[in-house]
């Protein structure tokens, strides 16, 4: 996922102007990037303004076909790992080092947590 | 682009996991088979086509409807046997290799798109048609064209 994320972000940001700051980049991930990859935007972005962001997708496209509720919940992480890499790889090529994890409590909603690493 | 890049990452990872080209090829074929046996349902639901009445119609269906639906390209179909059970799909354009320049020297026997063979084989099996599907020619290996060969075997319903 990391490798694909790097490739995708290169192609998507070829003609975009410079990002103002970290928050600007995260908004890009939530709006443009997510829309191009998953045909919808992130539904909710939260941050503590200290390098931690939580991206919430209420109808994550890779989980909608699997279940609507708690069925197969224990299998969800397998299907989220690639997307965590996608985010991490995308951010990496924008100059941001991060750790990305995902959490599901009720399908098909999920939350991606991005922890920016100071380099 | 997500699809093409992901496929490339998949093949690259398989090359790390397996030393021999043959093993990567087999793995891609098996994965493709797993996809094909399910993809056929999606295809039949979305295309609402009627049952094919001959191998020739089937080959045309694969090239003109299925390939168009899933890969956006339409390979040319050629019947390659008098018996009427062997066909070739000739791909002038193959989106899966859009970002591939050439195979690395140490991977000369890699069938980069072998997943496609498994997909076709699996899908056909679900409509009771047994077939052998292989790459006869591959532009990535230096051949003039990329050609997928489909050999329909004895009908499994018989």
Image (tube, grey):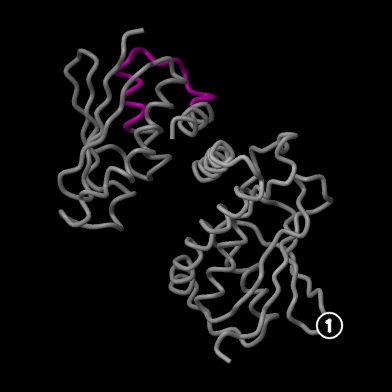
The quadrant of the rendering that contains the N terminus of chain A is top left
Q: Which residue is mark 1?
A: B82
Q: Hey, which residue is sitting farthest top in the picture? A: A119
On screen, residue A93 versus residue B68, left or right, reads left
The image shows residue A58 at horizontal and vertical percentages of 21, 44
The image shows residue A18 at horizontal and vertical percentages of 45, 15
Q: Residue at x 43, y 73 (%)?
A: B45
B150 w.r.t. A11: above or below = below
Q: Residue at x 80, y 53 (%)?
A: B145
Q: Quadrant of residue B77?
A: bottom right
On screen, residue A1 versus residue B106, left or right, reads left
Q: Residue at x 55, y 52 (%)?
A: B27
Q: Quadrant of residue A80?
A: top left
* Viewer-closest of A34 and A113: A113
The image shows residue A98 at horizontal and vertical percentages of 33, 20
* Viewer-closest of A95 and B151: B151
On screen, residue B17 versus residue A69, left or right, reads right
Q: SS class of the residue under badge 1?
A: loop
The image shows residue A57 at horizontal and vertical percentages of 24, 41
Magenta region: which residues? A13-30
B74 w.r.t. B82: above or below = above
The quadrant of the rendering that contains the C terminus of chain A is top left
Q: Hey, which residue is sitting farthest bottom in the picture? A: B158
A19 w.r.t. A29: above or below = above
């Amino acid at each position: 996922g990391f490798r694909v994320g790097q490739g995708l972000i290169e192609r998507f940001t070829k003609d975009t102007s410079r990002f103002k700051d970290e928050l600007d980049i995260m908004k890009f991930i939530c709006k443009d990037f997510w829309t191009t990859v998953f045909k919808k935007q992130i539904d909710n972005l939260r941050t503590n303004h200290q390098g931690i962001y939580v991206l919430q997708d209420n109808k994550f496209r890779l989980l909608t076909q699997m279940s609507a509720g708690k069925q197969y919940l224990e299998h969800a992480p397998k299907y989220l790992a690639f997307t965590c890499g996608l985010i991490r790889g995308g951010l990496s090529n924008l100059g941001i080092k991060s750790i990305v994890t995902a959490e599901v409590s009720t399908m098909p909603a999920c939350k991606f947590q991005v922890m920016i690493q100071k380099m | 682009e997500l699809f093409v890049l992901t496929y490339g990452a998949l093949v690259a990872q398989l090359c790390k996991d397996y030393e021999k080209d043959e093993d990567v090829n087999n793995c891609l074929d098996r994965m493709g088979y797993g996809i094909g046996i399910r993809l056929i349902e999606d295809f039949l639901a979305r295309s609402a086509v009627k049952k094919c009445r001959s191998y020739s119609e089937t080959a045309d269906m694969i090239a003109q409807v299925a390939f168009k639906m899933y890969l956006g390209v339409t390979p040319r179909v050629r019947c390659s046997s008098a018996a009427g059970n062997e066909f070739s799909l000739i791909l002038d354009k193959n989106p899966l290799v859009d970002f591939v320049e050439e195979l690395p020297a140490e991977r000369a026997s890699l069938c980069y798109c072998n997943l496609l063979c498994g997909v076709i084989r699996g899908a056909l099996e679900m409509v009771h048609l047994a077939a052998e599907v292989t790459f006869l020619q591959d532009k990535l290996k230096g051949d003039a064209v990329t050609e997928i060969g489909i050999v329909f075997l004895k009908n499994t319903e018989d």
